[in-house]
Image (cartoon, helix red, strand yellow):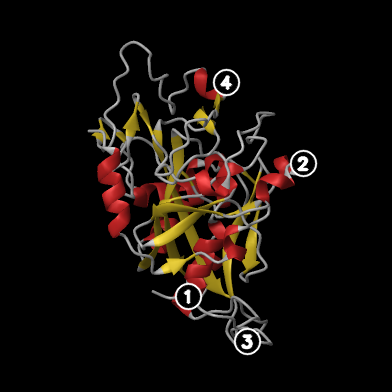
Amino acid sequence: MPLPAGSLRRAVAVLSLSVVLSARSAAQRRPAHSISSANCWSHLHPVNMFNSYNVKFYHSKALTSPYPGSHVERSQVPEDKVGWLTEWKDYNPVEYTAKSVLSGPSWADPQINDEGFSPKFNERDGEVERKSLNGLYVVENGRPRNPAGRTGLTGRGLLGRWGPNHAADPIITRWKRDGSGNKVAHPVTGKNILQFVAIKRRDCGEWAIPGGMVDPGEKISATLRREFGEEALNSLQKSPEEKEKLEKQLQKLFSQEHFVVYRGYVDDPRNTDNAWMETEAVNYHDETGETMDNLPLEAGDDAGVVKWIDISEKLELYASHSYFIKLVTEKWGAHWSEDPGPECHE
């Protein structure tokens, strides 16, 4: 059921901010494939987009050119024209959907006008979840509209689904320890240093959380475990005996108490006006370090390299991953920044 623009306007009017992303978090360096387009990164773009924790987003990565894996340049979107509530009659976005999506793989929708394709937006459509974690989104001329605002590009780009494309990001953490097994504190802040399992993405060379897309009908908990196994432990290449042993260890890690870090829209370089990334980021913390000691890290699937990385604000990570990691340090009272600065809390 499409949401009328008037209802969206009223809904936005009653929402209030409790947390605003810092400029440093929002202005992450651009992906390796867009080194030549610094002009697209010169401004932060505040937009009327809220996740389940009332965080206001800034479009920055979703406005970068060229579009990932292509030479396609987005139409320029001025800072004051990002939000859909601002009228812009001359808006002329570029239409682009990658050939890999148009070739009809199992993970992708057909084109909107294809015969027999009648998606049920804003609801569960068979095995495909078309509901957004951020609530109802507008459907205009048969196409979902990015709730965070204009991106300068229509179509789906590299994303398979019209509307929300759901991912899951497992953030596996432990305390950094010295040779004697004692926690290591940062010399300036005195706070203990947290480490997380990071992968270096093959597609753009950036460090990231080892997450991935939720398969149709799959529970988030299953996606979190599967993706971590595939990307950080190379489970797809293991023998049946090794897989069975690995599965038991993963069960122990993922059955412990966990912390949902974030649920909602992600400022991702693949986003378009009609397709966007959403994720559920969940922290599994290995307090003693004993569980992860028995899980040998080995890159697989989409990962080029996998390793434990010390957490600090100096990390430059893919999409909104630095922001998720910062929330984890706040949860555990771990080191993040040498500059005390003003803290933003709910």
Query: What residue sits right under mark 4 in the picture?
Result: 99
Amino acid type assigned to the residue bearing label 2 in the image: Ser
x and y, in percent, of residue 104 in the image? 47, 19
Secondary structure at numbered mark 3: loop
Cα distance between the residues tagged 2 and 1: 33 Å
Cα distance between the residues tagged 2 and 3: 37 Å
Badge number at residue 261: none
Secondary structure at numbered mark 2: loop
Quadrant in the picture for residue 188: bottom right
Badge number at residue 36: 2
The residue positioned 75% from the left and 44% from the top of the image is 35
In which quadrant is the N terminus drawn? Answer: top left
Query: What residue sits right under mark 3 in the picture?
Result: 189
Quick one: label 4 or label 1, which is nearer the N terminus? 4
Cα distance between the residues tagged 3 and 4: 49 Å
In the foreground, 11 or 342: 11
Quick one: label 2 or label 1, which is nearer the N terminus? 2
Quick one: label 2 or label 4, which is nearer the N terminus? 2
Evaluate if marks 2 and 4 touch, with contact meaning CB atoms under 8 Å apart: no
Quick one: label 3 or label 1, which is nearer the N terminus? 3
Q: Nearer the viewer, mark 4 or mark 1?
A: 1
Evaluate if marks 3 and 1 touch, with contact meaning CB atoms under 8 Å apart: no
Quadrant in the picture for residue 178: bottom right
